[in-house]
Image (tube, rainbow, N blue to C red):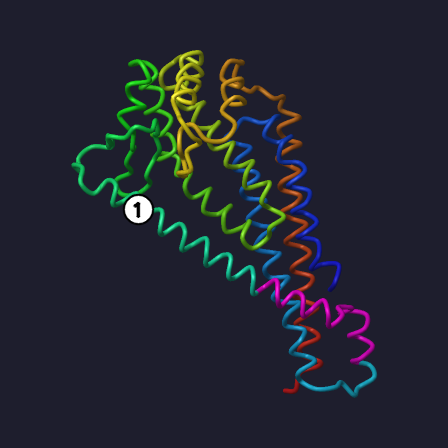
Amino acid sequence: MSISVYLPWLCSLLLAWAGPFVARWMAPARAAWSLALAAAACAAAALWGLVLMTATLLGEAAGPVTDRAVREDMRLAEPIPELVSLTAATLLGLACARAVAVVRRHRAVRARTARLCADHPHDGELVVVTSPRAEAFAVPGRPGRIVVTTTMLVALDAEERRVLLAHERAHLRLHHELFQAVLALAAAVDPLLIPTRRTVAFLLERWADEEAALEVGSRPAAARSLARAALATASAARTALAYTRLDVLGRVRALQSPPSAAGRTLAATTIALCLAVCLVVAASITDATADFITLAHRVLPH
């Protein structure tokens, strides 16, 4: 079982390494979906692997095994030292604590943005806030809102404002907040997925950029709007789904180039890589679970 429970962590490292290449080769939408699904599979499998390794301590608590054949089966099928199991138990506790912190932080952000929109009419999507800072971001909910400061609106011309609103509207329409929530929880459970979370966050911005360029019918206008908004922003926006966050220069360069048109073979290879990660993770954790169940039936008293 030991090799099986470690494979999800190895797959997480593979995703962290492959993420930038996936972002470069594929269209943002496909790349975001592929990486998000693979990361979710890795995180779920890593968490279950920690549970299984921690559960092997129950066998120690049940008392010594006197049957020689059972001891031999344990030696071959469950070569997990007690120190590793104790470490897994510690990591499991930390993973749960980090996941709870992510949920609390998410709820705090939602509450803060809800208060920001509370004093504005509920019959429109746009919320204009008087502020010396140039900011714009989407607030998911029912209905979703787009918050823009007066300073940001003044910094852009009419066409550039259309791009900004189309960008934030794309975040809401495509439910990008769900991608962010899944990746935040995945990285909380498996810190090796933190680079993948950052890559997906960048891809979500690129995805919204492409949707905005398509809606206004002008890639140069989309690039100009993003660049001017970034110049007007005094400091990096920290709000999720904000307009001028995550590698603005790279996003402007991408908009100044033709739409991503990776070859079918290259795109299919990339998607196959992410699917292979999911399959390997599923197979490894299934094998580890089967080994654990077999040992539990043999070792634990009935």
The answer to whether 87 is drawn above or below residue 13 in the figure is below
Residue bounds of the magenta highlight:
70-92
The answer to whether 254 is drawn above or below residue 185 in the figure is above
Reading the image, the residue beneath label 1 is 112
Residue 65, percent across and down?
A: 76, 85
Classify residue 158 by image quadrant: top left
The answer to whether 90 is drawn above or below residue 281 in the figure is below
Residue sitting nearer the eye, 244 or 26:
244
Residue at x-position 34% and y-position 30%: 136
Specify whether residue 22 is painted magenta.
no
User: What's the magenta bit mostly, secondary-structure-wise?
Assistant: helix
Residue at x-position 70% and y-position 81%: 299
Residue at x-position 34% and y-position 26%: 134
Classify residue 25 by image quadrant: top right
Q: Is residue 149 left or right of residue 41?
A: left
The answer to whether 126 is drawn above or below residue 61 in the figure is above
Residue 135, percent across and down?
A: 35, 29
- Image quadrant in which the N terminus is located: bottom right
Residue 101, percent across and down?
A: 46, 56
Disc 1 crowd rating (10 Å Cα; few below 14, some 14-19, many 20+) is: few
Classify residue 115 by image quadrant: top left
- Image quadrant in which the C terminus is located: bottom right
Specify whether residue 78 is painted magenta.
yes
Q: Is residue 196 left or right of residue 121?
A: right
Residue 141, percent across and down?
A: 30, 43
Q: Is residue 150 left or right of residue 220?
A: left
Numbered disc total: 1
Residue type for callout 1? Arg
Q: Secondary structure at mark 1?
A: helix
